[in-house]
Image: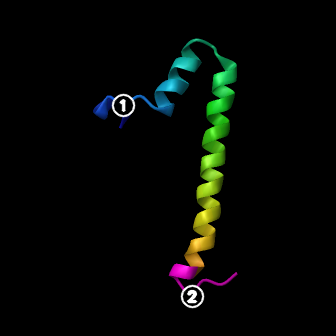
Amino acid sequence: VEVVFAYPGVGNLLYQAIRTFDYFVIYGVVFIVIVAIGLATFFLDLTLPVLDPRINY
């Protein structure tokens, strides 16, 4: 997506950090991605029972 739309994002940042051995940027990008996935999973777990009443925890 970044290449097609010529819009640099996290993937390009991670690629450049890996090429230049910038470990702090790599740690930061990995941390941000992990937090984003965790938050998305959390909110999905909260909204799924509202959307589908067959799901109960």
What segment is highlighted magenta in the picture? 50-57
| Residue occupying image coordinates x 66% and y 31% | 28
Nearest the viewer among 40 and 56 is: 40
Q: Quadrant of the C terminus?
A: bottom right
Location of residue 31 in the rendering, given as x and y in whole percent from the top left corner: 68, 38
Left or right of residue 34: residue 54? left
Let me know if residue 56 is in the magenta part.
Answer: yes
Which image quarter: residue 43? bottom right
The colour scheme used to paint the residues is: rainbow
Nearest to N terminus: mark 1 or mark 2: 1
Residues under numbered marks 1 and 2 in contact, where contact means CB atoms less than 8 Å apart: no
The label number, if any, that marks residue 30 in the structure image: none
* Residue, far left: 4
SS at badge 2? loop
Estimate the spatial distance between the alpha carbons at disc 1 and disc 2, rounded to whole Å: 41 Å
* Residue, far bottom: 54
Location of residue 17 in the rendering, given as x and y in whole percent from the top left corner: 57, 19
SS at badge 1? loop
| Residue occupying image coordinates x 56% and y 81% | 50
Q: Quadrant of the N terminus?
A: top left
Q: What's the magenta bit mostly, secondary-structure-wise? A: loop
Location of residue 41 in the rendering, given as x and y in whole percent from the top left corner: 61, 60
Number of residues whose C-alpha sits closer than 10 Å to that of mark 1, classed few (under 14), some (14–19) or many (20 or more): few
The label number, if any, that marks residue 54 in the structure image: 2
Left or right of residue 31: residue 15? left
| Residue occupying image coordinates x 58% and y 57% | 40
Question: Amino acid type of disc 1?
Answer: Tyr
Question: Amino acid type of disc 2?
Answer: Arg
Q: Which residue is mark 1?
A: 7
Residue 17, compared with residue 29, is above or below; it is above
* Residue, far top: 20
